[in-house]
Image: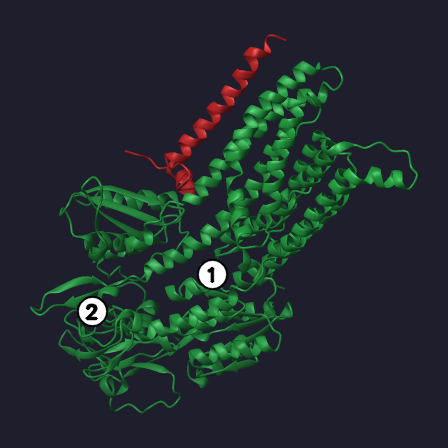
Chain colours: A red, B green
Amino acid sequence: MDIMIFLIPAAVCLGAMGLAAFFWSLKSGQYEDLDGAAHRILIDDE
Amino acid sequence: MATVALDAAEAGCPSGLAPPASGDNRADPAAFVRRDARGRDTLELLVQGAKCGGCIAKIEGGLLALPGVTDARLNLSTGRLRVAWSPGALKPSVVAEALTRLGYSATAFDPEAATRQTDEEGRKLLRCLAVAGFAAMNIMMFSVPIWSGDGEMGEGTRTLLHWVSALIAIPAALYAAQPFFRSAWRALSARHANMDVPISLAVVLTLGISVSETLQQGEHAYFDGITMLLFFLLIGRYLDHRLRERARTAARDLLALQAVTASRIDARGHVSAVAARDIAVGDRLQLAAGDRAVVDGVIEEGVSELDCSMLTGETLPQAARPGGAIHAGAINLTQRLIMRATAEVRDSAVAELARLIEIGEQGRARFVRLADKAAALYVPMVHSLAALSFLGWLLGPALLRALGFEVADVGVRIALMNAVAVLIITCPCALGLAVPAVQVVATGRLFKRGVLVKSGDALERLAQVDVVVFDKTGTLTLGKPRLVNEVDVETLRAAAALARISRHPLSRALVEAAGPGAPAKHAREIAGEGIEANMDGVTVRLGRRTFAAPDALDAVDGSAELWFAHGAGAPVRFTFADALRVDATETVAALKRRGIGVELVSGDRPIAVAAAARAAGIEHWAGGVAPADKVARLAALKAAGKKTLMVGDGLNDSPALAAAHASASPGTALEASQAASDIVLQGAELAPLVEAIDVAKAAKARALENLRFSALYNLIAAPMAAAGLLTPLIAALAMSGSSLIVTLNALRLQLERGRPWTS
């Protein structure tokens, strides 16, 4: 069961990375305009 | 003129989701320009009619093409447009004109009203939600081995897993539970209890008990339960918050829209744009044709006509001459006027109506929401049950021994454990989700049908409605005259050429009937009389009978009319009527079929009201009703035990909209009316009103089902917990299971779509 010493921190770190990514996306305003983002991807930028 | 026709065809939303704006963005936004941190001039505008990706590309592309504009960003969800340009590179009015050309109506924001743009509380809830979700998932990863390894897992491994869980759960729970702690503290300092008191208590007690169990290498720790509990509760809290925030934003946007500009003339005759609230008594203001007066005043120069339909419900324009009074809200139709302000914005006629609106809204604030009613019942019951089970386990054995039974004491630890189990299991996960989940689904469904529901409790009030009171002008009818008699195409086209230069409602109706075309050259408008032009050497006139065809006989039917005379030819008469909305009659019939009473109350002349009532199939009607009397009529209905839904659009309806049990206004209504009403119908139809009532009723049924289910769940789970039968596994299953069932039940509302509301 020694492997747990690596697995537990690894699992928690992965979760924490996901959490950090979510905070970053929240902070950079990616949830300000959900409708617009869905449409913007279809706009052609020349 | 070909370019004009081309632009008109392509104006507005390219997907055709919203009609192009008809009016001009005339208000000069210069007073709303601000310098941003990067030294650029920025302007915030609220754009109406932007619905799709094509709109984004069109608006942003169109504005970036203007010389000097460095940034243009449209938020499709809120309709807010932010434009930035290098200082002095262009005049702000150019931006407004560009938007008019693109076919969107836009209004500059009062920057003060728009400052709180980002929703800080919503972000905080989202952060708490994310932390709780992260903690719940990670701890579940450690809890599942404990549950499934039951009996085989060594005590050391179990305690290690408990400690790791504790290290995640303690900081996460203390962070994520902040919204509940804060709300519970506020309630307790005000000396009453809300739903957050048992939640906070459960969080703190459970954390404490679980840590003490872990220290004693005990079997049961509730770290997974507490984080999952917070996760589910925060979902409910966030949904509820989003609903309220949308309502608040809608109200704030409408308030910001009222912060309009006016053109002030200074002592040297120089005209400048000022914000309406900066107007002082005695200021000279210029009103171009099409402008709306923002304060009360007296006309000093110019002869024109005023459209007061928003103030009185009267469709026909009134004459304006020097010395005459002009009220805030009136629209100048034909020629430039110069007025002197006799009141500030806050003292103008509109402000009087605003006060009536405020009184009405105070009455509505007393409405108790369904969830609050449930909480009021729930909180004392849970607390007494938890206290009872603690005392029962602590004192019960001694009591039984006194009665002669052989029982051993269980101790404070077990008693506390079981009391906490009651608090956890009865924690209102399902109760917290029961109502917001339903309301979010219901408002989302109505939003797709073009009905903007401004708050969750509006939906609850709408479900109780048993009398609908309609206003006439602009609500049951389109609010603008339409050509009703048959005229040959050539005459119509010739008359429309003259009408094109005028803003008079009858002229606009004539132009609409004729379709696109070129305006007459060298035509001039004589205010209060009509339009005169010289076409190929022949004098052509369009206007009043006395102006265009003085020899013609007066038709006595009293309907709105225009006369057209082409040289010496026989004059032609055009008659107009304010047409009902296409589905007005059907809507009234559909309401009646649902057992809902329908009334028509209007400020217009009784003859016109009677005709509209007859056409729409409404038996109870009243004409010539003043705004205060509309409120009185609603009060009378309320006294008779009726729940009223007021549907209106004008300023004169706003107090009634605020006073009614629930209220709705069409999307064409004045901002003040939209601000005062609970729901806004965005299309040109009335039928969504019936669907809104149906959905509100279905939503209420779903919410009640959810509340009953939560009660049933608590009836089964709470005694189990009190009896000491609860394990962390059962708590986790019960909590997630009940939340899931409540959410799925709310989603059923989404499935019920497509049921035909007519026939």
The residue at the far front in this view is B402
Report the residue marked by disc 2. Answer: B288
List x then y, in percent, for residue B334.
23, 74
- Name the N-terminal-most of marks 1 and 2: 2
Front residue (pair B471, B425):
B425
Inspect the image, locate mark 2, and give the three-letter code of the amino acid beneath it. Answer: Ala
List x then y, in percent, for residue A9.
53, 16
* Separation (CA) of disc 1 from disc 2: 31 Å
Where residue B313 sits, quadrant-wise, is bottom left
The circle drawn on residue B606 is: none
Query: Is residue B236 left or right of B532 when viewed as pictured?
Result: right
Q: Is residue A34 visible?
A: yes
At 56% from the left and 79% from the top, the residue drawn is B636
Inspect the image, locate mark 1, and give the three-letter code of the amino acid beneath it. Answer: Leu
Subunit bearing disc 2: B
Secondary structure under tag 1 reads strand
Q: Is residue B104 visible?
A: no
Report the residue marked by disc 1. Answer: B681
Q: Could you tell me if the residues under marks 1 and 2 are in contact, i.e. CB atoms within 8 Å?
A: no
Front residue (pair B40, B486):
B40
Where residue B156 sits, quadrant-wise, is top right
Query: Is residue B669 left or right of B216 when viewed as pictured?
Result: left
